Image (cartoon, rainbow, N blue to C red):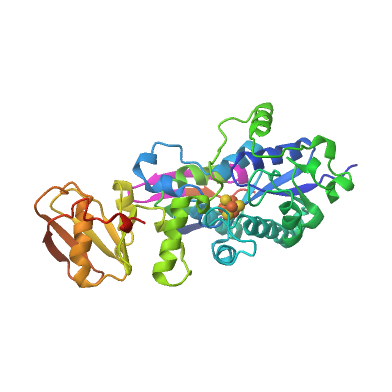
Amino acid sequence: MSEHELDARRMLCPMPVIKTQNKVKELAVGDILNVICTDPGVLSDIPAWARINGHKILGHHDNGDEITVTVQVGG
Amino acid sequence: MTTKHKAIALISGGLDSLLAVRVMQEQGIEVEGINFYTGFCVEGHTHAIRNHDKDKQKRNNALWAAEQLGIKLHIVDVIEEYKDVLLNPKHGYGANMNPCLDCKIFMVGKAVQWIQENRKDGFDFIITGEVIGQRPMSQRKQTMPIVAKESGAEDILVRPLCAKNLPATKPELEGWIDREKMYDFSGRTRKPQMALAAKYGFTDYASPAGGCCFLTDKNYSDKLVDLWDARGTREYEMDDIMLLKVGRHIRPKPEFKLIIARDAGESKYLEGYRKQFVTIQVVSHNGPLTMVDGDIKPEDFELAAGVVARYGQGRDAEQVEVHIFVPGEDIKIMNIKPLSVDQVNEDWHV
Ligand code: SF4
């Protein structure tokens, strides 16, 4: 299991979702991906994408300027 | 044992594709969704940018539809490839800059390509939510075979909402699906779709007024054409098409345009362009951040500042202080009188 980071800052939805989806394809089941974003829309879109495609959201962190969403790759 | 057949469905996030998939699921077909992002789609952006939309539910309708249906959704970035569809539509444009028929052909064609590239997943056919007569340009009786043929999908393209009005497709002829359990919707009425939605228990579905993208919007199309005319080329980048959704656009001279934020959310969004573009801000009073798109000459700074000041709280003041930020240069400070309403020419509004 390894941990990765994806920079999706200044992208507007659905681009952060598309980038996350494409990055996850390269990762192994159980890997962790931290997606750094600025569009608050990701707080609903990335979890929705994860639910329907079988991935898990481990949490998110919002520092006021940037939101980091943590995804665990599902099977 | 009967084999389970599998289809890929074009999901726009609207009601029609939602229903089309459910009709196929009822027949035991396993479905996955595909959604194409052209850059013009009516999704998250404006909600993310503008303040007053902040309270609205910020959902992506394609993802929402997939979740209702319990299907996987693949979102595909087609921004680059879509340029050719928009710039050179073989079948022309609709009422605005919407090349709907070419767009449909392109998207169904991409689904055909998806099936070929993902052979291991074993997709047998393609589903769309098209309805004959629903849209004046792309969804007419005559255009249905054109989409099937020019996309390369031919007889594996199934439109469950109007299949009974169309020739039988391979999945019907092979007995994978039952034609009798599909529909014969036609025309612009939405009543049959609403009744079917009620039957399936779908509520809270999206119903965009014009279509699935900004290109059907007159105001947006006018801004796009203005941009092309001003530049003398129809090339565009992602930033250009995003910026057309933001702010008030005023072109006081052919060479440059002012994009004036309408609220704090838009100001914040434009902040991100400060390193690349000239920006203007009134500092003596509250006022919106303005970005200059195009080639502004120093002798036009006063004119631009006067227009920008018109849209701030100092609009009636005798004098306001305006700062002009040119990337890589010192801030230019100007004290000017805001232009009056009459001085901001009606024709300048894009
Ligand atoms: S409304 Fe836009 S996305 Fe929908 S078919 Fe027309 S051009 Fe394509």
Residue B81 locus on image (x, y percent): 58, 65
In-front residue for pair B316/B291? B316
Residue B139 image position (x, y, % from top left): 67, 48
Residue in the picture at 77% in, 53% down: B123
Q: Is residue B100 magenta?
A: no
Note whether B209 is above or below A34 in the view shown: above
Instruction: Left or right? Give the position of B157 relative to B292.
Output: right
Q: Is residue B66 left or right of residue B293?
A: right
Q: Considering depth in this image, is A69 or B222 the residue closer to the camera?
A: B222
Nearer to the camera, B44 or B191: B191
Q: Where on the picture, by quarter, is residue B71? A: top right
Query: Depth check: B339 or A15 in front?
Result: B339
Give the mark count: 0
- Give the position of the N terminus of chain B as an image quadrant: top right
- Is B70 left or right of B167, judged from the image as shown? left
> With B252 as the anchor, is B37 left or right in this view?
right
User: Residue drawn 47% across and 66% down?
Assistant: B236
Q: Position of residue B207 (x, y in %)?
A: 56, 38
Residue at image position (72%, 37%) is B185
Seen as rendered, the residue at the extreme left is B318
Q: Position of residue B21 (x, y in %)?
A: 70, 41
Segment tinted magenta in the rendering: A51-69
The reply to whether residue B252 is visible in this rendering is: yes
Q: Up-down: is A3 above or below B183?
A: below
Q: Is residue A40 something one can see in this rendering?
A: no
Residue A60 covered by magenta stretch: yes
Where is the C terminus of chain B found, in terms of image quarters?
Answer: bottom left
